[in-house]
Amino acid sequence: MPKRILETTVDWARLKPEEFQWVPCVLCGSFEYTTLASLVINWSEFYLVRCEACDVVWRNPIPDARFLNDLYSEKYYNVATHSPALVYQVGIADWEVPDQNRRRTKTRQEVRRWEERGLTPRDEFNEPRHLLEIGGGRGYLQRAAAELGWSTLGLEISPYGIKAAIDQGLIMLPVTLEELSEKFIPYRDYFDTVVFFDFLEHIPDPGLVLRIVKYVLKEDGSVVLRIPLSGDCPKLHLIDHIWHFSKTSIAALLEREGFREIETVDSGVFEAPNADRIDNLTVFAKKGPRQPLGTAV
Ligand SMILES: [Zn+2]
């Protein structure tokens, strides 16, 4: 029997077993995995599994969009409403104004540092470059980028996050990247930079997102993403993180999807009071050359 590492109820998130699905490794497609531990959420058991061929760890089965929409309601953003067992499993600790200001300052510093890598807000004609942020939350990154001169657009599914962003004068569309693509909104080869911080680990199909990201990026466009690195067996964010990547597996996923010049940079630590810690990793990559039709990526 695998060790059980969390047992809790999430009172705002509906949980219907038929809305969950067993999935293979996002990197190699294998169902050959080792079970590391189990967790019980709302009396249903889930398993943390590791692909026997790759470094990828994920929670199986994984939820569908209805569960995720419910999970990312306003309560997700308010740690004051969480039970102590949940504070470091869901949500974002930015309810208090000092926390918000700290995040704002840190995000601005981070976006400014991109300029050292040539990711500048204006092109050679002093025109603003286009930045898309996916999973924009309350708009910290989009606001920082807009203040530095980028032309920005955000996507977010949480009505709460969207309202917070709109209140700051930002454009945050209430659609997923898949929906943006399905509606044939003409953003093909449009963005100079696509950014997602703390996003890829939350979504059911990271590979699909990366393929659509390539579609909306210009030929020489860049992707900047940040993920948590959770070590051998994750202990935090077991409810809202579906995928737990390592430096190796995130780089392998980007490479499989055709990105190049992949560079990983340590980007700070999230400290929890119970002495567990999460190291964050920022990954920079360039859109690779266009693949001929029928070429597997
Ligand atoms: Zn695998």
Image (cartoon, helix red, strand yellow):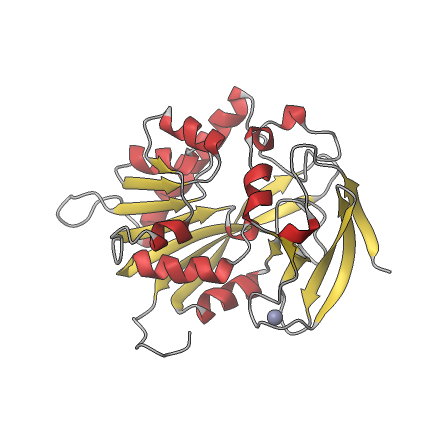
Q: Position of residue 177 (x, y in %)?
A: 40, 50
Q: Position of residue 182 (x, y in %)?
A: 36, 54
Of all residues, the one furthest to the right in this rendering is 1
Q: Quadrant of residue 173?
A: top left
Which of the pair 103/37 is nearer the observer?
A: 37
Residue 108 to residue 78: above or below: below
Q: Position of residue 39 (x, y in %)?
A: 77, 49
Q: Quadrant of residue 168?
A: top left
**Residue at 24% across, 46% down:** 129
Residue 17 to residue 29: above or below: above
Instruction: Indicate the quadrant of ligand 1 in the picture.
Output: bottom right
On the rendered structure, is 230 left or right of 74?
right
**Residue at 66% across, 52% down:** 18
Q: Quadrant of the N terminus?
A: bottom right
On the rendered structure, is 25 left or right of 34?
left
Q: Position of residue 97 (x, y in %)?
A: 51, 20
